[in-house]
Image (tube, rainbow, N blue to C red):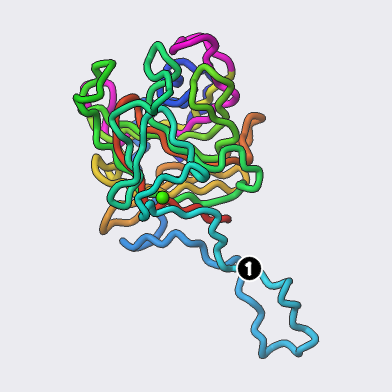
């Protein structure tokens, strides 16, 4: 995989988005090379069964394995939500920092802080977060699929004068620990960061990155460069033309130490963004999934599905 870098650094700018979660970094020129699997526009990433079952006609009854010994080739769905009932589900989801609503069959970020949350750069955090199954030890090897859009900043809610074109988002997976407040212990998660628009010099459409946060949080109140824990950049890439200012259909797979991610676009093959083995001591083995939207940028998710691998 081109563009692979392994740099340990303390959580600095990382902290702005979601605890120590880091925004996508600079893009090596060769990182957008298409490594898409050979799938068509329908993009079925479902792996083939490990091995064909023995041909029954070649076996006597006594040789047939018990049913319990047969490999289970049916995918086990761990979680699915298409947000179709227009009702939030606080038993399933954490809706953090900004207010959310299910509208039009999607989970949407609203342009206002969650009531009761001390929002802001000098407060306990910025950027909407929606997460599920934080710390779930039974969620180890899985595929996450979802649709994601960032619609930018609305002038009606822009307390820190962010450029209205600002659009970034993070997909969080193996979320072992997370907290709504960046001032409370603590965040331990993988993060796929996506830059979803070109906006000034700060973000460029098509940049992306993979990072890992381990026990990150900021003591005190408000954002600070002084923090606890570590954040590690595992990969930075760019020039991924399949990453869209519109709807992004994303797939993340974690199996053992291997981390892969793809972005799908209509009528085109899936484009692989990430194929990394994380075998470092801080590698994370379990946990839930989530999405964060950068700072005050808004947007939605839909068709979230998690399947056991
Ligand atoms: Ca619902």
56 left or right of 161 in image: right
Q: Which residue carries the number 1 mark?
A: 72
Residue 85's x, y, as percent? 37, 54
116 to the left or right of 200 = right
Write the start and end of the magenta stretch as one range.
Answer: 199-228
- Name the one closer to the observer, 94 or 268: 94
Name the residue: 41% across, 45% down: 88
Residue count near mark 1 (Cα–Cα under 10 Å), binned few <14, some 14–19, many ≥20: few
Nearer-the-camera pick, 116 or 299 = 116
Whether residue 249 sits left or right of residue 157 in the image: it is right
Residue positioned 47% across, 34% down in the render: 191
Q: How many marks?
A: 1
Residue at 49 percent across and 20 percent down: it is 182
Point out residue 145 in the picture as x, y percentages from the top left corner: 43, 51
Q: Is residue 68 above or below residue 138?
A: below
Is 265 or 287 nearer to us in this picture?
287
Return the residue nearer the eye: 268 or 86.
86
Label 1's element? loop
Residue furthest toward the right?
Answer: 62
**Residue 3 in view (yes/no):** no
Q: Position of residue 273 (x, y in %)?
A: 40, 43
Q: Position of residue 142 (x, y in %)?
A: 55, 51
190 lies above or below 302: above
As for residue 28 lying within the magenta part, the answer is no
Can residue 179 be spotted in the picture?
Answer: yes
* Magenta-span inclusion, residue 218: yes
Note whether ligand 1 is within 8 Å of mark 1.
no
Residue 132 is left or right of residue 42, and the answer is right
Report the quarter where the C terminus lies: bottom right
Please, what is the dominant secondary structure of the magenta stretch? loop
Above or below, 239 relative to 153: below
**Residue found at x 37% / y 29%:** 98
């Amino acid at each position: 995989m081109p563009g692979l870098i392994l740099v340990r650094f303390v959580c600095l700018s990382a902290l702005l988005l979601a605890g120590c979660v880091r925004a996508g970094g600079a893009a090596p020129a060769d990182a957008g090379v298409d490594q898409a699997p050979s799938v068509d526009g329908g993009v079925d990433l479902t792996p083939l069964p490990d091995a064909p079952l023995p041909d029954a006609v070649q076996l006597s009854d006594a040789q047939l394995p018990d049913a319990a010994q047969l490999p289970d080739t049916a995918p086990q769905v761990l979680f699915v939500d298409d947000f179709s009932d227009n009702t939030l589900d606080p038993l399933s989801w954490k809706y953090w920092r900004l207010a959310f609503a299910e509208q039009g069959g999607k989970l949407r970020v609203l342009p206002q802080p969650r009531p009761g949350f001390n929002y802001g750069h000098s407060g306990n955090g910025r950027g909407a977060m929606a997460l599920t199954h934080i710390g779930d030890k039974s969620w180890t090897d899985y595929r996450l699929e979802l649709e994601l859009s960032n619609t930018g900043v609305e002038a009606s809610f822009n307390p820190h004068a962010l450029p209205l074109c600002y659009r970034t988002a993070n997909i969080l997976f193996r979320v072992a620990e997370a907290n709504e407040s960046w001032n409370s212990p603590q965040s331990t998660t993988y993060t796929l960061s996506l830059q979803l628009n070109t906006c000034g010099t700060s973000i460029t459409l098509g940049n992306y990155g993979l990072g890992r946060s381990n026990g990150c949080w900021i003591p005190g109140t408000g954002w600070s460069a002084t923090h606890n824990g570590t954040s590690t950049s595992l990969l930075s890439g760019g020039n991924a033309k399949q990453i869209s200012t519109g709807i992004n259909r994303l797939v993340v797979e974690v199996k053992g130490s291997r981390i892969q991610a793809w972005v799908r676009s209509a009528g085109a093959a899936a484009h692989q963004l990430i194929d990394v083995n994380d075998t470092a001591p801080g590698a994370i083995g379990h946990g839930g999934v989530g999405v964060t939207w950068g700072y005050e940028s808004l947007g939605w998710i839909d068709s979230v599905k998690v399947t056991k691998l």
